[in-house]
Amino acid sequence: MEIGLNTSTLRGNSMLELIGMIAEKGFNAIELECNPCPEEVHGIWAREADHEFVEKLKEAVSGFKEVSFHAPYHFFDVNIISPNPFVRKLSVEEIIFVMELANALGRRNVTVHTGAKNPLLKDPVINEYLRETLTALNDAAVKNDVMIGVEVVDYFYCPKRFELIEELALSNVGITLDIGHLCFPQPELGGRPGFSQYGSIEGVIRRYAKLIRHVHIHDFSFARNKDHLAFGDGNLDMISIVNTLRNNGFDGTLLMELTPLVPMEKILSGKKLLEKITDWKQ
């Protein structure tokens, strides 16, 4: 397994500076935020990435074993389950620009969100939208030689809905398993965490092991109902979670995705913990 950090965890003067900071701390994998984010986050807007910027980006990430990309998500108006067909179409286009950027850099993993679920829509209707949009995204993923991971968030906070992705059996579409997101209480489950559909986080991993392409890993506090925490600031058993991933065939990236409020010493102690669990050697 590779161990990485998402660029949104840190603050810097530019995306290139953030990449340099992560490389300097010894991470061998990185995830690039591809959102037209507020200035301080320095997310990449793939639609506007010109040749000069792509070449600089390619050089900046050249030392990483794994580079993944986080496509735009719903609070920036990207929603592949919108009831508006024009919004769905534009959302697919925005994600395809990220795929093309990944292809230009010779990298493969792209994480996507569905976008917010309209409370007036029932699951069968949303599933029809997903059949349309995920099929279109898969076609583009095949063309660009990338793999899509649909994240545990928004519509997929309840992981049982990932049965749709199993049913579709699209060659280049899988799951980005977000460990903390599995813990949020879900109204559809009577306020129980999303993972309760399978008994535990480990139960979700075992159920969907064949579909897991990528992992966002961070701690979660049940008392505070808060995610993206440093390891040890919540309640999750990282050793059990990582061992379950490994024992069920996952050998991809463990991507630390933390709030920018986490101090660097805690980021690095989390990195050291993951290295110890995975017997990672530099």
Image (cartoon, helix red, strand yellow):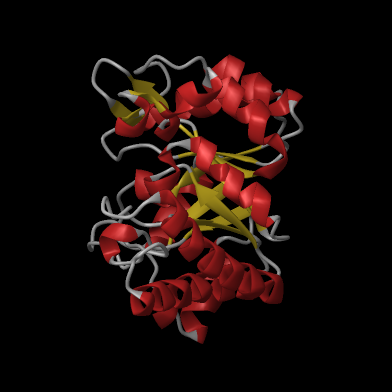
Image-quadrant location for residue 73: bottom left
- Residue 26, image x and y in percent? 56, 40
* Image quarter of the N terminus: top right
* Residue at the outermost bottom position: 51
Between 87 and 43, the one nearer to me in the picture: 87
Between 36 and 162, the one nearer to me in the picture: 162
Tell me if I can see residue 216 in this picture.
no
Tell me if I can see residue 166 in this picture.
yes
- Is residue 217 depicted above or below 13 in this figure? above
Q: Residue at x 73, y 60 (%)?
A: 171
- Residue 221, image x and y in percent? 32, 19
Q: Residue at x 65, y 30 (%)?
A: 207
Image-quadrant location for residue 211: top right
Between 80 and 29, the one nearer to me in the picture: 80
Q: Residue at x 74, y 28 (%)?
A: 248
Between 194 and 33, the one nearer to me in the picture: 194
- Is residue 135 depicted above or below 66 in this figure? below
- Residue 241, image x and y in percent? 58, 21
- Residue 138, image x and y in percent? 63, 67
Left or right of 204 on screen, residue 35: left
Image-quadrant location for residue 27: top right
